[in-house]
Image (cartoon, grey):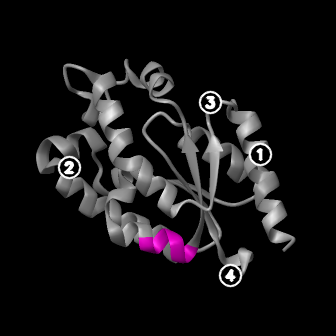
Amino acid sequence: MNQENLSIVLVGLMGSGKTTIGRLLARRIGLPFYDSDHEVERRTGVKVATIFDVEGEAGFRVREAATIAELLGSPGSIIATGGGAVLRPENRAAMKARAWVVYLDVPVRQLYERTRHDPNRPLLRVPDPLKRLEELRAERDPLYRDVADFILDGARYHSGAAVNRISKEWERRSEK
């Protein structure tokens, strides 16, 4: 696959750093950056949490899939996906076909510390958010691993070091 025509897609659970790392990586590599959740919000004019409230998770996932398909239709960008984007087979197929996918693998306890006070996490509006994160990880980790071309141990790297590691791997792959 010609690397010039690829996008880099970041996957992982909420709070794994996809948006932060994606923005920094885009600056480093010189590609445009898109956050699929922010793109859904821009297109609908409402927050993801509101879409969840009105349409439920299923309604949001339809909008998310359309947004991801469109973003992947314009190669050569950095795309941070929502944590559940891998749940839909068509999203995984599109990522595998049109992107180099990086899984930001971060331990649940660390994710909990990063997300526990964020009101914009509709899936964590439950009595036990830590348990919910553990359930989400159990469900999604195999899907992230299936779609990933590169897995970054997010417990070992702060955002700047993560960008360095990802960009080195990207450059190494382009030399092949």
Residue 124 lies within the magenta run? no
Q: Residues within 10 Å of mark 3 (few under 14, many from 20)?
A: some
Secondary structure, mark 1, is helix
Q: Residues within 10 Å of mark 2 (few under 14, many from 20)?
A: some
Tell me which amino acid carries mark 2: Glu
Q: Nearer the viewer, mark 2 or mark 3?
A: 3
Name above or below for residue 115 compared with residue 172: above
User: Residue 160's spot in the image, x, y percent?
Assistant: 74, 35
Tell me which amino acid carries mark 4: Met
Determine contact: label 4, label 3, CB under 8 Å: no
Identify residue for label 2.
57
User: Residue 46's spot in the image, x, y percent?
Assistant: 27, 45
Identify residue for label 4.
1
- Where, quadrant-wise, is the N terminus in this rendering? bottom right
Q: Nearer the viewer, mark 3 or mark 1?
A: 3
**Label placed on residue 143:** none
Q: Nearer the viewer, mark 4 or mark 2?
A: 4
Whichever of labels 2 and 3 marks the residue nearer the N terminus, that label is 2
Q: Nearer the viewer, mark 2 or mark 1?
A: 1
Whichever of labels 1 and 4 marks the residue nearer the N terminus, that label is 4
Residue 96 lies within the magenta run? yes
